[in-house]
Amino acid sequence: MAKITRPKCYDEEVYTRIEMQDLILFGIYSVSKNGEICTFERLVAECFMGFPKIFAFKRFPEWPDSLKFDRPLRTLREKGLIVGGAKDYLSLTKFGEKKAIRTKENLESKGILNQRKKISKGRSTDDRLITYLKETSQFKAFIMNPDNFFISDPEFRNISGLTDIYQDLTMNRRGDRDGRI
């Protein structure tokens, strides 16, 4: 049996711009190129050690989240990029291997840094909302100067997805239009 080698951790600025499915393909490719059989557990370890920001639990970043592999592995299988499954072992098809090699080139060349950073979706609606709010210019202005920060009602409604119904609800409940809930 081949010796298991610890994969290198890639540059976070680079790998966070690459699709999760492509990183999984690269993980399968890396394990196979080391002469190992790519079991599900080995793939989770490979991807977590190489790309910890993508494959970790959100609240416990020191642990890998194996559920993040479920849907992408099904999709890769449906696209004909991989064969096998979690119960036995995984391997790449010829097309999957070509795509994994392109991912390897992107990871090593850093040419992908010119592309827009992909925003992680997170599992829950709350996580997605928090991620969205952190990306707004209003939140960034608040972080820069919290003491002098002001947001108008229209700006708040715009970023929160609320409409003028918000004002009607607050007026009906409180009898005034001060906008406080």
Image (spheres, rainbow, N blue to C red):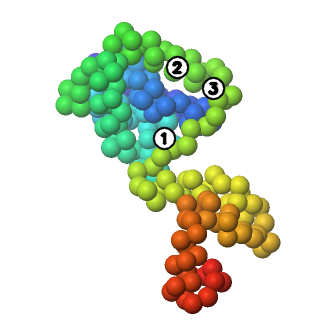
Residue extending furthest left? 87
Name which quarter of the figure residue 47 lies in. top left
Q: Amino acid at mark 2?
A: Lys
99 relative to 178, above or below:
above
Of the numbered discs 1 and 3, the one sitting upstream in the chain is 1
Residue at position x 61%, y 59% in the image: 159
Mark seen at residue 104: 2
Q: Position of residue 173 (x, y in %)?
A: 51, 86
Q: Residues within 10 Å of mark 1 (few under 14, many from 20)?
A: many
Q: Position of residue 124 (x, y in %)?
A: 41, 55
Q: Position of residue 33 (x, y in %)?
A: 40, 15
**Cα distance between the residues tagged 2 and 1:** 16 Å
Name which quarter of the figure residue 41 lies in. top left
The residue to which callout 3 is attached is: 112
Mark seen at residue 54: 1
Residue extending furthest bottom? 175
In which quadrant of the rendered image does the C terminus lie? bottom right
144 relative to 9, above or below:
below
Front one among 114 and 34: 114
**Cα distance between the residues tagged 1 and 3:** 16 Å
Q: Is residue 62 visible?
A: no
Residue at position x 67%, y 66% in the image: 154
* Left or right, 180 with reference to 35: right
